[in-house]
Each structure stands twice: as structure tokens, then as C-alpha cells.
Amino acid sequence: MRNAAFEDMGFKAYKAKRNFRQTAEPDPRVIKRSGENALLFVIQKHEATRLHYDFRLEMDGVLKSWAVPKGIPTKHGEKHLAIRVEDHPMEYADFEGTIAEGNYGAGTVMVWDTGTYEILGTGPATALREGKLHLRMFGKKLQGEWTLVRLKPLPGKRET
């Protein structure tokens, strides 16, 4: 079974959660880059209801995104939960600022790390669809290999 929440969320959910007259967050559009440019990753520190980090990978013209409540693991073998959230526009990669009170994600956002990444093994879209992204990141702070693995649903629950 496919996990649609893990795969393609598009911008419908992103737009539905935001009032662009009240937030400085970018209004989304898909950006297709040409050439063999390296793929971008960004990690944003987000002081919202609870402090967490947003991990974003450029893929198919958007930023595929995960909320990481306990921060990015930095030690080999360390595991942290990453919760798939809606795709974000590429313009969000350098977004920093305050999301006004009363808006989705209200609080401060700052770029914590940025760089490029490559998927080891299969291509990014295939790895995402299969639920295992083994990647190498070349960031300002983080450099090395990480793996995102989709968890199986709890007994009695179905994949969404």
C-alpha cells in the first residue's frame, strides 16, 4: 500500500493552512530547475507551540518536508522521529522571520543549516515512494549520511 502522506502532499494543504495577507511566508509555486544542479536541503529551527526543526529536501520542484520534534540526530545510530508535513515551495528554503500569532505555525523561523544532498542507491522520487531515503548531506553544519525510514502503521491502523 502507498503512503500518500509520505509522498505527494502538493500545495493544497500548504495554502489551506495560511493567510498570505497575515504571514510573510512565500505563496507557493512549483519551480523546475534545469541542468544537473545538486539538490538542496534546508533545516529550519522553528520556535512555534513547541520548538522543533523542519527538515526539507528539494524534490520535483518543491521542498518535501518533515517536522523533527527532538532535533536532527547528530550521532551515528541515533534515531529521531520525523513527521511528514505538507510540501513547501522552493522559496521557503531561505525563509526566516516571525509567523504572526493566530496563524498556522505561529512563531519564529530561522535557517539552521543548508546545503546539498544526494540520494544513495535509487533516485529521490523512487526512494520517497518506497519509504527509505538514504542520503548524504553536504551542509554548513551537517555533513555525512542519514536515513529516513517510513514506519509501518500500528496494528489495526491503515496507511494514509
Image (cartoon, rainbow, N blue to C red):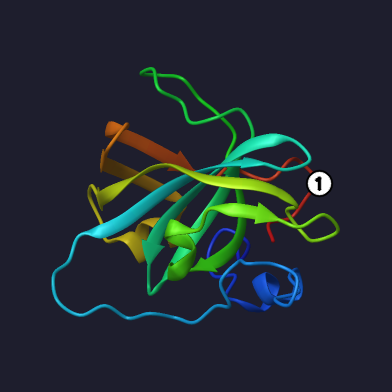
Is 44 situated above or below 102?
above
Is 85 situated above or below 150?
below
On the rendered image, what quadrant is the N terminus found in?
bottom right
Q: In this view, does 157 lie to the left or right of 13?
A: right
Dot 1: element: loop
Whole-percent x, y for residue 55 in the image: 49, 46
| Residue highlighted by disc 1 | 156
Q: Which residue is rendered at x = 78% and y = 49% of the image? A: 157
Q: In this view, does 95 lie to the left or right of 24?
A: left
Q: Residue furthest right?
A: 102
Whole-percent x, y for residue 155 in the image: 76, 41
Residue 42 can be seen, yes or no: yes
The three-letter amino acid code for the residue at tag 1 is Gly
Q: Residue furthest left?
A: 36
Q: Which residue is rendered at x = 40% and y = 22% of the image? A: 74
Q: Which residue is rendered at x = 43% and y = 59% of the image? A: 93
Q: Is residue 102 left or right of residue 37?
A: right
Q: Is residue 64 left or right of residue 101?
A: left
User: Which is more toward the observer, 154 or 40?
Assistant: 40
User: Which is more toward the observer, 151 or 72?
Assistant: 72
User: Which is more toward the observer, 32 or 118?
Assistant: 32
Whole-percent x, y for residue 100 in the image: 76, 57
Q: Quadrant of residue 51?
A: top right
Is 142 situated above or below 27?
above
